[in-house]
């Protein structure tokens, strides 16, 4: 029986130095035997029988999983994610006793605005790889140098090549604090922050902490749900609880209905990881289990990913992109450690986080819910930007990198005037 | 599959016969397990602890012997018969006492007929186990659809309601014109449905996980609201227990929503074992009784042992029924512990480690024809498996009033 392992280069031993602020260059180097073993396991997968329905209502469908496993076990380039990550400058630095992995791309344009982008679950820095170039060097991608960013994309603790916490306490609040430390350590005296999924929560917390360096935030999964609406949603998870709130506008009612589905049917994975992350041993032992678990985030993104494995990718969410992310999680054995963030979390996913800094919101049509402008204005008293776009799911940066880039540029443009140009 | 013409009501003998290759593959997979890192807490609050599952895995791949379990099963009369289009596997053990009362016992999740094996002798042959001939039962112990050696449904619809109809048909097919039914966990849902359907021949049910919660209490507990006013101390305690349980049943809600996504319980033996171990009882998650059994190698009194836990887990693995069994949660759309309106005679045993201790007040309201109610002082959610002697004596007492002096039940 093998002992717990983390494949690939191991971050430095923890707990040796107390406050080592050095920033060390990092490259991914995956051992060949780990890839051979991965392929062996994928090809040797033992399957359950097919679902008893003709749709996705019982979970990730067998045909989709078998198409994924076939490609993963044969033609997919298992070193694709490694090459892509190594095409960017990557670093490790220790924050609060934990090695944090991050991509750091300085813009060639001197007035670039520093931006920290935080990924979510079941994502990783892979989600952001296609927006780093356009954001850091707009003229090379059809944009204006005045929109340039220095881009920092960290891996959350327990994710990718960041270290795995061995004790409790790395919740979104702690991560938000660590990101502020990271940006200061990189020498930035002014910066903005962006996120979706967990990244949105962490970015919101940064906006509530409002360090003087933080000029503003942008979220593609904003926390806007008013407390009485949130309470009604929570009370209906197991049975018939509080009645739905009255007096909602059409937009608000639509948001409530989407959230109601999510709370009762759509986020079982989140609740399971919130209670029993360690019990998910299959995520460490079975590549196809890990893949299925990661595919099953929400109905709309699942539809898009299933389409990718049926030969019809939606936007940039191709089967290669999807497998880059899953292969990274397998090679780093982070299925369980990443799930622990749900156990650590005490915040309401979509609740108002009391952000005080300037906030920008982009609403993607296939996000978990579409934040109404009315709620966004209440949640973010200093709302500097609000825009509803016409395509994109929960993985906005990953699926629609061009549109996402356009949104992030527009979102922060007003913060640059007089200061940055 | 059959190429011969046969009536669908045939009852065919069945023996378990697992090929050596399946056992070798299981051992190989357990030995090659890729583990996650250790939990970040010192208790079981993040799930099944790494050390616990690694210790079990070590035993599983070395000294554990499935063939012993297979031998136990094959020493019992096993059959397959097609019910409502699906092959159903069942044990059918007749008492030597011809007047014995026919009893169908229904297991639950994450269990199987393995849960009931220790009940068979005391119930079938009471005179050899501290009882009288008048306590004897003829036993029918089916595997639920999607479980063990029963067929796996390929379409939807096999919820507790349909199972109850199938069990009534099974008892009729076996020639029993008067019988009783028993269940815990999913088995309790099925026997409640049997009670509601009240098929001809069904005299009474016994449940060790009774559904008694009044509507206002049910609503408040599910919403996480404060309890309704006017509860007695015992009812208040039950209310608190329900709240605790609802905070521990995310595995159930997950299987109700996305059973097919659990590919890890088909592909990874350790993934399956951890998933099956992590069922709660009143005293812990994993159930305190299961945690205790992990360290129990033998028991003279029939308490749950490590081998029995692995018998059950290995049965799931060898039949690849992790996902098909989970689908039962998806099929069921009703409430958990709300009173269902059963009008036929009902017997209830309240075990201290069960999800909640059904107060007599609620039980009398939920089951207006309550013929037996007893609170015992040992045993939990897996009562038949944990305390078979006590469980058997409860079943004897529960149904005693139904036995006509000298009457026949078949």
Image (cartoon, grey):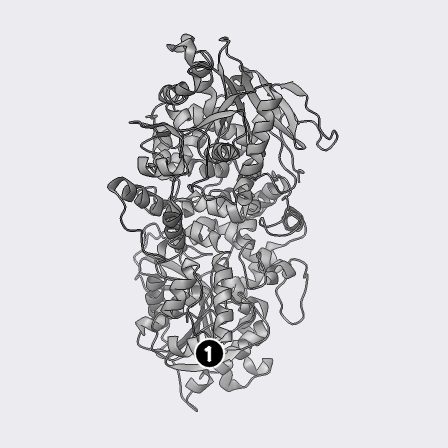
The image shows residue B237 at horizontal and vertical percentages of: 51, 70
Q: Is residue A351 above or below residue B283?
A: above
Farthest-out residue, front: A418
Q: Chain of mark 1?
A: B
Q: How many marks?
A: 1
Residue occupying image coordinates x 56% and y 28%: A179
**Residue B184 is at least partly visible in this image:** yes
Farthest-out residue, bottom: B405
Q: Locate the N terminus of chain A and report the quarter of the image it occupies.
A: top right
Farthest-out residue, right: A16
The image shows residue A185 at horizontal and vertical percentages of: 62, 22
Q: Is residue A29 above or below residue B348?
A: above
Which residue carries the number 1 mark?
B360
Closer to the camera, A355 or B108? Answer: A355
Q: Locate the C terminus of chain A and report the quarter of the image it occupies.
A: top left
Closer to the camera, A314 or B173? Answer: A314
Say what secondary structure mark 1 lies in: helix
């Amino acid at each position: 029986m093998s002992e717990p392992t983390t494949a690939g280069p191991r971050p430095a031993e923890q707990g040796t130095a107390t406050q080592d602020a050095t920033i060390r260059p990092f490259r991914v180097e995956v051992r060949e035997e780990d890839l051979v073993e991965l392929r062996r396991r994928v090809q040797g997968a033992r399957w359950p029988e097919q679902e008893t329905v003709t749709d996705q209502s019982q979970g990730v469908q067998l045909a989709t999983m078998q198409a994924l496993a076939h490609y993963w076990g044969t033609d997919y380039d298992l070193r694709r994610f490694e090459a892509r990550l190594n095409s960017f400058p990557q670093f490790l630095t220790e924050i609060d006793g934990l090695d944090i992995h991050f991509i750091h791309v300085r813009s060639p344009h001197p007035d670039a605005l520093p931006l920290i982008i935080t990924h979510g679950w079941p994502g990783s820095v892979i989600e952001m790889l296609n927006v780093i170039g356009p954001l850091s060097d707009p003229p090379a991608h059809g944009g204006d140098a005045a929109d340039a960013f220095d881009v920092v994309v960290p891996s959350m603790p327990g994710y990718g090549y960041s270290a795995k916490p061995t004790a409790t306490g790395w919740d979104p609040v702690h991560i938000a604090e660590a990101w502020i430390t990271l940006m200061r350590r990189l020498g930035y005296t002014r910066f903005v922050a962006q996120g979706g999924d967990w990244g949105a929560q962490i970015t919101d917390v940064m906006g509530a902490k409002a360090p003087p360096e933080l000029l503003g935030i942008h979220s593609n999964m904003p926390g806007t749900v008013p407390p009485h609406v949130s309470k009604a949603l929570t009370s209906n998870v197991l049975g018939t609880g509080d009645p739905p709130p009255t007096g909602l506008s059409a937009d608000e009612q639509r948001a409530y209905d989407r959230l109601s589905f999510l709370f009762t049917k759509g986020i079982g994975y989140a609740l399971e990881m919130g209670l029993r992350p360690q019990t998910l041993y299959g995520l460490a032992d079975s590549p196809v289990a890990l893949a299925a678990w990661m595919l099953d985030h929400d109905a709309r993104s699942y539809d898009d990913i299933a389409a990718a494995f049926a030969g019809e990718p939606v936007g940039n969410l191709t089967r290669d992109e999807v497998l880059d992310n899953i292969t990274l999680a397998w090679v780093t054995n982070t299925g369980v450690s990443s799930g622990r963030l749900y156990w650590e979390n005490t915040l309401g996913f979509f609740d108002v986080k009391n952000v005080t800094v300037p906030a920008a919101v982009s609403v993607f049509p296939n996000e978990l819910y579409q934040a109404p402008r009315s709620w966004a204005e209440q949640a973010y008293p200093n709302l500097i930007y609000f825009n509803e776009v016409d395509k994109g799911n929960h993985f906005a940066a990953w699926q629609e990198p061009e549109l996402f880039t356009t949104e992030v540029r527009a979102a922060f443009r007003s913060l640059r005037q007089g200061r940055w140009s | 599959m059959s190429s011969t013409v046969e009536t669908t009501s045939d009852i065919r003998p069945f023996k378990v016969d697992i090929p050596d290759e399946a056992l070798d593959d299981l051992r190989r997979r357990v030995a090659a397990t890729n583990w996650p890192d250790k939990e970040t807490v010192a208790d079981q609050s993040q799930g099944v602890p790494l050390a616990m599952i690694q210790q079990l895995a070590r035993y599983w791949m070395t000294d554990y012997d499935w063939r012993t379990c297979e031998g136990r099963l094959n020493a019992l009369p096993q059959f397959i018969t097609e019910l409502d289009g699906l092959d159903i596997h069942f044990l059918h053990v007749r008492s030597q006492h011809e007047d014995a009362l026919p009893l169908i016992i229904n297991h639950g999740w994450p269990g199987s007929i393995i849960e009931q094996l220790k009940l068979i002798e005391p119930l079938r042959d009471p005179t050899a186990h501290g009882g009288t001939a008048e306590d004897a039962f003829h036993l029918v112990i089916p595997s639920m659809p999607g479980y063990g050696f029963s067929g796996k449904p390929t379409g939807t619809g096999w919820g507790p309601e349909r199972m109850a109809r199938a069990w009534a048909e099974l008892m009729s097919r076996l020639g029993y014109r008067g019988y009783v039914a028993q269940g815990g966990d999913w088995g309790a849902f099925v026997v409640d449905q049997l009670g509601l359907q009240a098929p001809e021949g069904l005299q009474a049910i016994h449940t060790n996980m009774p559904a008694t919660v009044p509507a206002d209490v049910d609503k408040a507990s599910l919403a996480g609201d404060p309890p309704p006013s006017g509860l007695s101390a015992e009812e208040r305690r039950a209310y608190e227990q329900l709240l605790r349980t609802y905070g521990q049943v995310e595995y159930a809600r997950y299987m109700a929503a996305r059973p097919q996504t659990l590919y890890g319980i088909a592909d990874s033996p350790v993934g399956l074992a951890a998933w099956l171990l992590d069922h709660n009882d009143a005293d812990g998650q994993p159930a305190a009784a299961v945690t205790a059994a992990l360290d129990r190698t033998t028991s003279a009194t029939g308490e749950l042992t490590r081998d029995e836990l692995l018998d059950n887990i290995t049965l799931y693995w060898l039949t690849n029924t992790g996902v098909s069994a989970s689908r039962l949660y998806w099929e069921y759309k009703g409430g958990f512990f709300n009173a269902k309106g059963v009008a036929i005679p009902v017997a209830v045993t309240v075990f201290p480690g069960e999800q909640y201790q059904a107060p007599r007040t609620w039980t009398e309201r939920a089951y207006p024809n309550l013929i037996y109610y007893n609170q015992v002082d040992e045993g939990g959610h897996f009562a038949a498996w944990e305390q078979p002697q006590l469980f058997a004596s409860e079943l004897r007492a529960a149904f005693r009033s139904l036995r006509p002096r000298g009457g026949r039940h078949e």
